[in-house]
Amino acid sequence: IPLSGRNPLFQETLGLKPHLLVLNKMDLADLTEQQKIMQRLEGEGLKNVIFTNCLKDENVKQIIPMVTELMGSSPRYHRGENLEYCIMVIGVPNVGKSSLINSLRRQHLRKGTGA
């Protein structure tokens, strides 16, 4: 992640809450470097990472199952009675947050744009 796309407050604010790092706009990156990027992020303690291209809905179908698994495996957030979760999409400007939300809507709700 380029320095311009990092915000140390994100990690500090998230703390122990389960989270997934979505690296959008993978079509603009050199995909031959993807494994190196994953290894570096894992070295920094980021284990739940996914590369996406929200304009073409690439890998977006994997996000909801990954988030569900993260929430279910987190003891603090495991609630047997309530199967509904609130999730938050955060990021610095121009990283594709609205594109991600719209892609999720297309994939899982069968609805168009809304964000």
Image (cartoon, grey):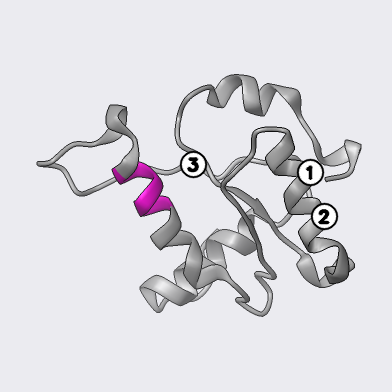
Along the line of sight, the residue nearer the viewer: 108 or 36 = 36
Q: Which residue is mark 3?
A: 88
Instruction: Label 3: state its secondary structure.
Output: loop
Magenta-tinted stretch: 67-72
Q: Quadrant of residue 79?
A: top left
Along the line of sight, the residue nearer the viewer: 18 or 54 = 18
- Residue placed at 32% from the left, 42% from the top? 73
- Residue placed at 35% from the left, 43% from the top? 71
What is the three-letter code of the residue carrying label 2? Lys
- Position of the N terminus, as image quadrant, is top right
Instruction: Label 2: state its secondary structure.
Output: helix
Along the line of sight, the residue nearer the viewer: 59 or 95 = 59
**Pointer 3 or 2: first along the chain:** 2
> Contact, CB < 8 Å: mark 2 with mark 1?
yes
What is the three-letter code of the residue carrying label 3? Met
Q: Which residue is mark 1?
A: 40
- Residue placed at 42% from the left, 60% from the top? 64
